[in-house]
Structures are given as structure tokens and as C-alpha cells.
């Protein structure tokens, strides 16, 4: 008799994304008319949707609030088939992020926090972890005054049968040192982009940064996402580049999230780290060909892209 299936347990933050597509970013004090816009749930939802579309069960263990943004976030969480661990936090709405997307597909963010930034020890005590689960921790959470210390105290209690993936995110420089140290101590996998890797290591070359990060912690390995170049994987004492897939970029919003979600799902399915990163590269490549944040592809779509570009 087999037990429950492994899950991705996401402790990060679902917010609402206000996305605007601009002909150019405005100068200071200026204004630009958007060619189009959309309001949708995003943030941590993107990682979870990516993993779910690859066939992994997902539980959202972060906070959500009470109000119009929270209602929208919950509606899309439920539509995606995700489990909600926490009850709604009263008297505070879910936060939102304004994403400005320029013609190259690059995006610039400004974020207003809400209920998702109020995760505490009692909330984490509700999280019932099972062997084989993968816990995802976001650097946004680690940087928040409530979430960060709560996670730093909780991470050492996670049993070894549970894999911990840390994604430090754009706010990596804002994470307090004791909180960051706790994340390093318990991390099995560390996944970040080139900018974040350079901030953490002072190494401009992604291979050097990945090797330096692997020396610092992360029991299983490190992934440094390098956008159109793919990703660098450091694991088992070696560092190698896993190439990307050539695509026409429309919107890079959510590409890193699509990568991490697919990588976790691939690991849980039994793929080795190189195969998992290659599958994650394919997922991110397909995601950037579509407008919007939660644009991660399905498992079938990833299979088709991989079949069209066999590994050499």
C-alpha cells in the first residue's frame, strides 16, 4: 500500500499582478500609455502553476487576506487545483505588484505588500509535511519582517525526508543575515538568476557564482538561471552549463518561476539534476513566448519541445 503522493509545499507569497505592456519605460516624472494591460494573480502562483502543469500536487502554505485582491487570488488558486493550507487573514487584503513590460519583454516591478507578508509561527505550525514533499521558500518571504524570522525558526525543524528549495529572488540583498544563514543551513537546492548569484558571491561569471554558492551550502546543488543562455548547474562537485532552447521572446514575466516549478516537478518524478534543469529550461522557454505571468506550459508541451531538440 503506497502513501500520499509527494507535493510542492509553497511557503511564499501569492499577490495580484497589475501588468502593463509599454512602448518604453517612462522617464522620471513622465507618463507612458500602455498598449495593453491585465490584472491577474501572480507572484508565488506562477511557481505553483508551473509545477502543477507538470503533474505535481501543490499546496499553498502562504497567507492570503480578505478583500478584492485576496478574492481574485483565491479564485485562481482554486481554479489551478491547488490546496490552500491557511485560512483567510481578516482585515487585510492580499498585496499587489505593478509589472511594467517593455518591447524587449523585460519587466520592472514595484510591489505593495499585504496579507502574504504576515506569515507567523502559528501559521507554519499548520503545515503538515510528508516524506517526499518539496518545500519552496521565496526570498520575498525571507525579507519580510514577519515571514523571515518565522521561516528561519521553522526551517531547521523540517525533517530530512523533505527537500527544501530556496529561491532568493530580487530582494536577496534585503534578507537579514541570520535569516539567510538559516536558509543556507537547511537548503537542499538553491535556485537563482545571474543577478542574484552575483550579489551573493561577487562573481560575475555564472559558472564561478554557481560553484561559489555550492561551496556555501545547498546539500544537493545550485541552479543559476541565465535567461536566453539556459542555466548553470552545480552539483556533485562539478559545474556545467545546460543550454537553452531558441524561441521568440514576448514576455519574460514569470520565466524564472516557470523554471523553478518545472525543475521541482522533474526532480520529484525521478529525473536526475541535469535532465531536470533541461526540462526546466524548456518550460521557461515556452513561458516567455506568451504574454502574462502564469504562462508555464503543460507537460505535453514540454515533451514536444524536448523531442524537437534532442540532447547531444
Image: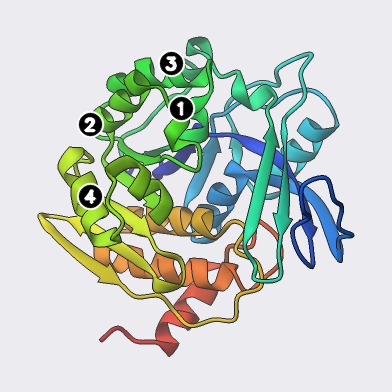
* Image quadrant in which the N terminus is located: top left
Distance from disc 1 to disc 4, alpha carbons, whole Å, reads: 20 Å
Instruction: Return the residue nearer the eye: 286 or 217.
Output: 217
The spot of residue 155 in percent (x, y) is 34, 23
Which mark's residue is nearer the viewer, 1 or 4?
A: 1
Instruction: Return the residue nearer the eye: 160 or 36.
Output: 36
The spot of residue 60 in percent (x, y) is 56, 35
* Image quadrant in which the C terminus is located: bottom left
Name which of mark 1 and mark 4 comes first in the sequence: 1
Can residue 269 be seen at all in this image of the molecule? yes
- Mark 1 neighbour class, 10 Å CA radius: few under 14, some 14 to 19, many 20 or more: many
Name which of mark 3 and mark 2 comes first in the sequence: 3
Circle 3/circle 4 CB separation < 8 Å: no
Q: Which mark is residue 149?
A: 3
- Mark 2 neighbour class, 10 Å CA radius: few under 14, some 14 to 19, many 20 or more: few
Distance from disc 1 to disc 3, alpha carbons, whole Å, reads: 7 Å
Looking at this rendering, what residue extends furthest in the right direction?
A: 33
Q: Residue at x 34, y 86 (%)?
A: 310
SS assignment at label 2: loop
Reading the image, the residue beneath label 4 is: 221
Which mark's residue is nearer the viewer, 2 or 1?
A: 1
Q: Residue at x 86, y 58 (%)?
A: 32
SS assignment at label 3: helix
Q: Residue at x 39, y 55 (%)?
A: 194
Distance from disc 2 to disc 4, alpha carbons, whole Å, reads: 15 Å
Reading the image, the residue beneath label 2 is: 160
Residue 131: quadrant of the picture: top left
Circle 2/circle 1 CB separation < 8 Å: no
- Mark 3 neighbour class, 10 Å CA radius: few under 14, some 14 to 19, many 20 or more: many
Which mark's residue is nearer the viewer, 2 or 4?
A: 4
Distance from disc 2 to disc 1, alpha carbons, whole Å, reads: 21 Å
Amino acid at each position: 500500500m503506497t502513501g500520499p503522493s509527494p507535493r510542492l509545499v509553497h511557503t511564499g507569497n501569492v499577490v495580484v499582478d497589475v501588468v502593463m505592456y509599454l512602448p518604453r519605460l517612462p522617464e522620471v516624472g513622465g507618463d507612458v500609455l500602455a498598449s495593453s494591460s491585465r490584472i491577474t494573480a501572480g507572484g508565488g502562483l506562477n511557481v505553483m502553476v508551473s509545477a502543477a502543469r507538470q503533474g505535481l500536487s501543490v499546496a499553498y502554505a502562504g497567507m492570503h487576506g480578505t478583500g478584492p485582491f485576496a478574492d481574485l487570488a483565491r479564485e485562481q488558486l482554486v481554479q489551478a487545483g491547488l490546496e490552500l493550507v491557511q485560512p483567510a487573514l481578516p482585515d487585510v487584503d492580499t498585496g499587489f505588484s505593478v509589472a511594467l513590460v517593455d518591447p524587449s519583454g523585460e519587466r520592472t516591478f514595484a510591489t505593495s505588500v499585504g496579507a502574504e507578508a504576515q506569515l507567523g509561527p502559528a501559521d507554519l505550525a499548520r503545515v503538515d509535511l510528508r516524506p517526499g514533499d518539496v518545500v519552496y521558500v521565496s526570498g520575498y518571504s525571507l525579507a519580510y519582517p514577519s515571514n523571515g524570522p518565522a521561516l528561519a525558526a521553522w526551517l531547521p525543524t523540517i525533517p530530512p525526508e523533505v527537500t527544501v528549495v530556496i529561491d532568493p529572488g530580487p530582494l536577496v540583498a534585503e534578507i537579514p543575515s541570520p535569516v539567510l544563514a538559516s536558509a543556507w543551513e537547511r537548503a537542499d537546492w538553491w535556485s537563482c538568476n545571474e543577478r542574484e548569484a552575483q550579489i551573493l558571491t561577487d562573481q560575475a561569471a555564472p559558472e564561478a557564482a554557481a560553484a561559489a554558492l555550492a561551496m556555501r551550502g545547498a546539500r544537493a546543488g545550485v541552479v543559476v538561471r541565465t535567461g536566453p543562455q539556459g542555466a548553470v548547474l552545480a552539483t556533485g562537485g562539478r559545474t556545467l552549463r545546460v543550454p537553452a532552447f531558441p524561441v521568440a521572446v514576448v514576455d519574460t514575466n514569470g520565466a524564472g518561476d516557470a523554471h523553478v516549478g518545472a525543475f521541482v516537478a522533474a526532480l520529484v518524478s525521478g529525473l536526475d539534476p541535469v535532465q531536470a534543469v533541461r526540462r526546466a529550461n524548456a518550460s521557461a522557454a515556452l513561458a516567455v513566448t506568451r504574454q502574462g505571468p502564469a504562462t508555464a506550459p503543460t507537460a505535453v508541451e514540454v515533451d514536444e519541445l524536448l523531442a524537437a531538440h534532442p540532447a547531444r
